[in-house]
Image (cartoon, coloured by chain):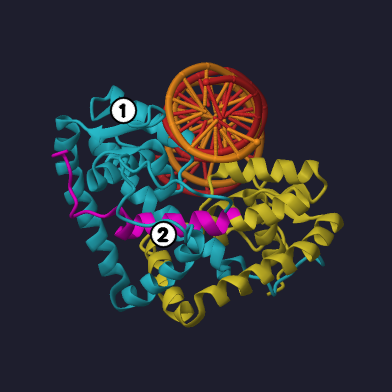
Chain colours: A yellow, B cyan, C red, D orange
Amino acid sequence: MPHRFPEFDLQRFLAYRLARAAQHLSEELARRYRDRFGISIPEWRVLAHLAYSGDVSVRDIEIRTGMEKSQVSRAAARLEAAGHVAKQVNECDRRLVSLSLTPGGCDLMAELLPVALAYQAEIEQRLGGALAGFEAGLDRLIGAAEDPADDRGDNRVERREERHDPAA
Amino acid sequence: MPHRFPEFDLQRFLAYRLARAAQHLSEELARRYRDRFGISIPEWRVLAHLAYSGDVSVRDIEIRTGMEKSQVSRAAARLEAAGHVAKQVNECDRRLVSLSLTPGGCDLMAELLPVALAYQAEIEQRLGGALAGFEAGLDRLIGAAEDPADDRGDNRVERREERHDPAA
DNA sequence: AGATATTCATTGCATTTGCAACGATTGTCA
DNA sequence: TGACAATCGTTGCAAATGCAATGAATATCT
């Protein structure tokens, strides 16, 4: 067949290879979470961010994770229905919804975190000596993704008078 | 608030960071393709494999890209409707559908490839000195994902003889 | 050869996703 | 102050996705 471009190999295309690797890791982790805890990836991300940061708004999670706000909102709704997360209107700015872990959600995270850490260790082992170089590349790609020229982003999150716990 | 696990930072979690970077690159490329050519990512992948390998079956693309076969089938159907791809039953094995670029699809690829190559160069520039280390890490992660029992080079539809896969 | 199992591509169906629009609230500025 | 703009979270809706089931074709085995 004459219609070919053998000089272009998709398997060497960085955007494609990155997507493949990410898909594989995400599915592997998602399977462990879904099978054992019934947690999806969006729900896991919301939980993890919540566990790390304490009370946060939907918008905070949207900014820090790059998820769609509707995806965050729906994940939060499912987590609330499951009793893992509590939603509360922020009294300083009644447009904001403050998300927080319930005691039950805290217990769930105590089970989820060892699984996540074990998986992280597994990936690091797979990478072996390539770990440092791989992370350096990720830093550059993600650094370029978080548009630093846009000052609205950071300011808007922190501009609101300090809410919630001042714990660092 | 007591319910926190500040020792776990999602931003340092490899599966998460990889997903973020991949999402960013894919969306960046997808925007260029969609805006200028009306091509989605699944369609681009099918086209690229077709251009590289000549005639291939839906199953070949499924195996080599890790896409769902329904996704490949639907992308091929859209590409056929758009006149970029031709579908033809393989006479050696009438279960297989042989996909091939039409002359129009060939012209489209001639426009798409420079965009892809320019984007690849852009990413390589972003990675700079981290490029080699990053690719080494990708190789390890993808290598663990791929089925190690498939030979390269003869994935075309013509092969139909040696088909023995007891269990995988 | 005939019966059964496998493989391939497509399609139905339920779920998820992205995007726009909305109501509610707060910020801006004349 | 009051009109107008911007922000936040939710929801409606069309499109995409994953999975199972289907029908057609081939492989395998006795």
Which three-letter amino acid code belongs to the residue tagged 1? Answer: Glu
Instruction: Assess disc 2: are there few (<14), some (14-19) or many (≥20) residues with their C-alpha within 10 Å of its C-alpha.
Output: many
Q: Where is residue D14 in the image (x, y as percent from the top left)?
A: 47, 22
Q: Image quadrant for the C terminus of chain A?
A: bottom right
User: From where the camera sits, is residue B98 visible?
Assistant: yes
* Dominant secondary structure (helix, strand or loop) of the stretch shown in magenta: helix
**Mark 2, mark 1: which one is toward the viewer?**
1
Residue corresponding to mark 2: A18
Residue shown at 56% from the left, 50% from the top: B166
Query: Which one is nearer the viewer's eye here, C6 or B116?
Result: C6
Q: What element carries label 2?
A: helix
Task: Kindly report the distance in space between the C-alpha atoms of the residues bearing marks 2 and 1.
Answer: 36 Å
Whether A152 is among the magenta residues is no
Front one among B76 and B32: B76
Q: Residues within 10 Å of mark 1 (few under 14, many from 20)?
A: few
Examine the structure image and report whether residue A10 is included in the region drawn in magenta. Answer: yes
Residue A18 image point, x, y percent: 41, 59
In x, y percent, where is residue B18?
49, 62
Q: Are marks 2 and 1 on the same chain?
A: no
The N terminus of chain A, quarter of image: top left
Residue in front for this viewpoint, B156 or B72: B156
Which chain does tag 2 point to? A
* Residue designated by label 1: B91
Q: Mark 1 lies on which chain?
A: B
Q: Determine whether B41 is above or below A98 in the image.
A: above
Region rendered in magenta: A1-27
Tell me the kind of residue under disc 2. Answer: Leu
Q: Residue furthest right?
A: A103
Q: Is residue A41 above or below residue B37?
A: below
**Number of the label disc, if any, that sits on residue B133:** none
Query: In the figure, is residue A30 to the left or right of B79?
Result: right
